[in-house]
Image: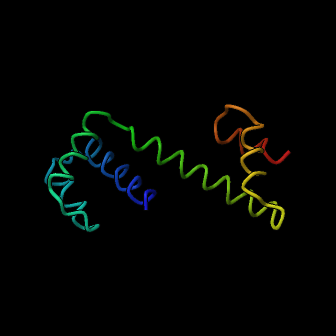
């Protein structure tokens, strides 16, 4: 559920800052997903206006981690565990996702 909300916020961020959405555009977008409380939508809109690309960076990072995890499950099969996955990522250290992908399976 929270990943869906984060995705909606990221799309709204792009709509506002790239496509020039106004509050009414954001409200129409949220209404199509069942979010209809206008006060809540206005709060979300104001948060996104105040901090451009904030939700987008977290959503992209989330998607990158999902991809890493999918690759780990495919590579390790029955030997996959959450602990092994997290240890492999942390053992690489601070790095971009492409670097983590390259070295976490060595």
Number of marks? 0
Q: Residue at x 54, y 45 (%)?
A: 61
Q: Position of residue 90 (x, y in %)?
A: 72, 38
Q: Residue at x 64, y 41 (%)?
A: 97
Residue 87 drawn at (x, y percent): 76, 44
The one of 77 and 101 positioned closer to us in this rendering: 77
Write the residue at 72% across / 47% down.
86
Q: For the point 17% across and 59% down, which residue is it?
A: 37
Q: Is residue 61 left or right of residue 103?
A: left
Vertical comparison of 79 with 103: above or below = below
Q: How is the image coloured?
A: rainbow
Is 94 displayed left or right of 47 in the figure?
Answer: right
Relative to residue 30, is residue 19 depicted above or below? above
Q: Is residue 98 left or right of residue 1?
A: right
Residue 51: quadrant of the picture: top left
* Screen quadrant of the N terminus: bottom left
- The C terminus, quarter of image: top right
Q: Position of residue 19 (x, y in %)?
A: 26, 47
Q: Is 8 placed left or right of 100 in the picture?
A: left
Find the residue positioned furthest to the front: 83
Image quadrant in which you'd find residue 48: top left
Q: Nearer the viewer, residue 81 or 4?
A: 81
Classify 60 as above or below 33.
above
């Amino acid at each position: 559920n929270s990943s869906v909300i984060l995705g909606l916020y990221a799309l709204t961020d792009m709509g506002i800052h790239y496509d020039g959405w106004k509050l009414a555009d954001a409200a129409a977008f949220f209404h199509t997903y069942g979010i209809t409380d206008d006060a809540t939508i206005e709060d979300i809109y104001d948060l996104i206006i105040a901090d451009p690309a904030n939700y987008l960076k977290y959503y992209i990072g989330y998607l990158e981690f999902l991809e890493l995890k999918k690759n780990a499950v495919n590579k390790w099969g029955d030997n996959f565990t959450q602990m092994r996955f997290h240890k492999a990522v942390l053992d690489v250290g601070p790095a971009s996702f492409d670097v983590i992908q390259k070295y976490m399976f060595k």
